[in-house]
Image (cartoon, helix red, strand yellow):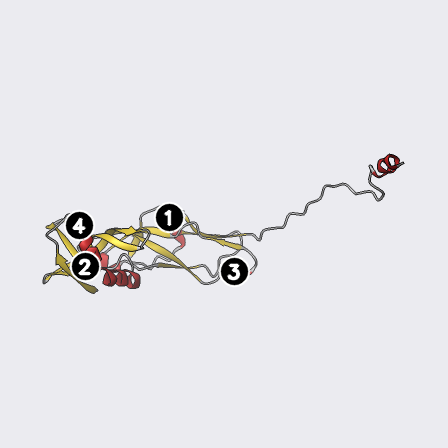
Amino acid sequence: MTTLQATERTEFTNSAKRKIRESGKVPAVIYGKASENKSVALDSIELIKTLREEGKNSIITLDVNGSSHAVMLYDMQKDPLKNEIVHADFHIVDMKSDVQVEVPIHLTGEALGVKDGGVLQQPLHEVTITAKPGKIPQTIDVDITNLGVNETLLIKDIPNNRNYSFVQDEEQVIASVLPPQQEAEIDSGEEQEAGTPENEEGREHNAE
């Protein structure tokens, strides 16, 4: 579990938040059922590094002036132009209680159907699960090696040796292999007769 240092915020104006961002930190709020909301600021680079390496559903320990809080990222706002985090919301987690999160699906292997010329499609890239905070996988790996042409892989086909349960319909398609696309042949069904163009004779008469 990664520990990030955070400092409590006492000013909440837009100008104060802007100064925090200019100093390389992210303004954030910690929420908890059994504790009061706490406004904090933490290092932007360290937060981005943690989320990149451990995933958005990782458990993070926020050390706020010597007081530790086990949290998960609940939401964050990003600047679309600078691709920077401008605000983050964290929820204090109860390690014994289930939480509901979205986890990315990662396809592994090369499908047999693709080797045969088929086209792989993946309509589902994330799946919603419930699990204990310490049992949340960073990704759900799905092996598609044996997936042939005209075959589909559903949520329910994921092996059951897991520490989580699915929230959404298990009949949803994760991946499928479509048949090779056949090139359409253009055929009018008529044979072209040999000979001169119809207006050839007309051009000759006009020339006389």
Is label 3 in contact with label 2 (beta carbons under 8 Å)? no
In front: label 4 or label 2: 4
Can the viewer see residue 96?
no
Residue 152 point in image, percent of width and height:
47, 51
The residue at which mark 3 appears reads as 112
The residue at which mark 4 appears reads as 15
Q: Secondary structure at mark 4?
A: helix
In front: label 3 or label 1: 3
For marks 3 and 1 on the same chain, the one whose residue lies earlier in the sequence = 3
The amino acid pointed to by label 2 is Leu
For marks 4 and 2 on the same chain, the one whose residue lies earlier in the sequence = 4
For marks 2 and 1 on the same chain, the one whose residue lies earlier in the sequence = 2
In front: label 2 or label 1: 2
Q: Secondary structure at mark 1?
A: loop
The residue at which mark 1 appears reads as 170
Residue 69 point in image, percent of width and height:
14, 58
For marks 3 and 2 on the same chain, the one whose residue lies earlier in the sequence = 2
The amino acid pointed to by label 1 is Glu
The residue at which mark 2 appears reads as 42
Q: Which residue: 23% across, 57% down? A: 133
